[in-house]
Image: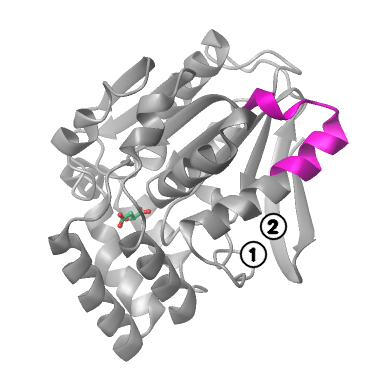
């Protein structure tokens, strides 16, 4: 059964969802999203934690922990909104969960989507001993190029002038592939409508954190644990070529390309993404 949890972190409220029992699997969302982007994958476990179909997970094998990052959804912004600061917030959640479930830190499986992946990489750099497996959905260990930084500066100006929702309304359609626009306009529309509550301060803080994040290819290179890469063939944010370039870095990589997805495979090819994630978890 899925439960909603709110905790106090250094005087700020942090929210996350949990489902299932067993090894902790943290699914971290990206920019302009909440943990809800993982809701289809969370149903890998049915309400009793039992197996639902051939690619779902055995009961009591995994516990999904799906936070709203500070500043997104039901989590408040914190004093340190850098990737490292958000990684610390994730560690706080993990420590709390581990203590409650009597599991050990080194069992954690951490998977991040896009900016959630940048945060996950910062976590891996600081707290690598916690991890038994790692995953990046439409994400990259490379830092922003100068061109990308310039685009983010323009984005910040736009947010200051027009507000958070106008910015997200303008930019979010670009996250989805042409096929998704053709076949699922309603899904895209309801995703966009769900973004109304973001504040300009949070979006600007994320952009600044992404602009100043370091290249973390060395973190991937040091990884001896299994690493999952899920990429979208039609991704405008992390182009397939750039996403693929990093996949040889870890010792053990599992690489999947979603042929019909842009940047949002968890929504655009939700079943396939679920199966990839379930197969990866079962393989551990
Ligand atoms: C995200 O989806 O988290 C962002 O688009 C990532 C980025 O802008 O680099």
Q: Earlier in the sequence, mark 1 or mark 2?
A: 2
**Residue occupying image coordinates x 31% and y 87%:** 162
- The magenta stretch is 94-108
Q: Is residue 178 above or below residue 200?
A: above
**Label placed on residue 75:** 1
Q: Is residue 24 visible?
A: yes
Front residue of 78 and 178: 78
Label 1 residue near ligand 1, CB within 8 Å: no
**Residue occupying image coordinates x 26% and y 21%:** 248
Q: Are marks 1 and 2 in contact (CB under 8 Å)?
A: yes
Q: Is residue 267 above or below residue 185?
A: above
Residue 80 percent across, percent down from the top left: 56, 68
Q: Residue furthest bottom?
A: 161
Query: Which element carries disc 2, helix, strand or loop?
Result: strand
Query: Which element carries disc 1, helix, strand or loop?
Result: loop
- In whole angstroms, how far apart are the C-alphas of marks 1 and 2? 5 Å
Image quadrant holding the N terminus, namely top right
**Residue occupying image coordinates x 71% and y 50%:** 92
**Residue under pointer 2:** 15
Front residue of 18 and 93: 93
**Label placed on residue 31:** none
Residue 138 percent across, percent down from the top left: 32, 39
Quadrant of the picture in which ligand 1 is shown: bottom left
């Amino acid at each position: 059964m899925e439960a909603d949890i709110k905790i106090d972190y250094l005087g700020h409220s942090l929210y996350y969802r949990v489902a299932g029992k067993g090894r902790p699997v943290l699914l971290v969302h990206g920019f302009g999203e909440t943990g809800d982007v993982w809701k289809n994958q969370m149903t890998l476990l049915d309400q009793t934690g039992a197996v639902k179909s051939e690619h779902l997970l055995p009961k009591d094998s995994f516990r999904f922990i799906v936070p709203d990052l500070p500043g997104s959804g039901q989590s408040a912004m914190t004093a340190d909104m850098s990737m490292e600061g958000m990684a610390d917030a994730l560690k706080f959640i993990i420590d709390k969960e581990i203590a409650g479930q009597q599991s050990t830190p080194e069992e954690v499986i951490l998977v991040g989507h896009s900016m959630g992946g940048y945060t996950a990489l910062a976590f891996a750099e600081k707290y690598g001993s916690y991890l038994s497996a790692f995953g990046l959905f439409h994400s990259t260990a490379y830092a922003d190029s100068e061109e990308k930084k310039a685009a983010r500066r323009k984005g910040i100006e736009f947010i200051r002038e027009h507000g958070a929702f106008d910015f997200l309304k303008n930019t979010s359609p670009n996250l989805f592939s042409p096929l998704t626009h053709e076949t699922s306009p309603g899904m895209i529309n309801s995703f966009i409508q769900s973004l109304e509550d973001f504040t300009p301060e949070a979006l600007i803080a994320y952009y600044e954190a992404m602009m100043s994040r370091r290249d973390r290819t060395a973190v991937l290179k040091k990884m001896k644990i299994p690493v999952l890469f899920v990429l979208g063939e039609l991704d405008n944010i992390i182009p397939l070529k750039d996403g693929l370039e990093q996949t040889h870095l870890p010792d053990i990589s599992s690489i999947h390309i979603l042929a019909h997805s842009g940047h949002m495979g968890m929504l655009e090819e939700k079943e396939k993404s679920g199966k990839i994630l379930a197969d990866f978890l079962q393989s551990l």
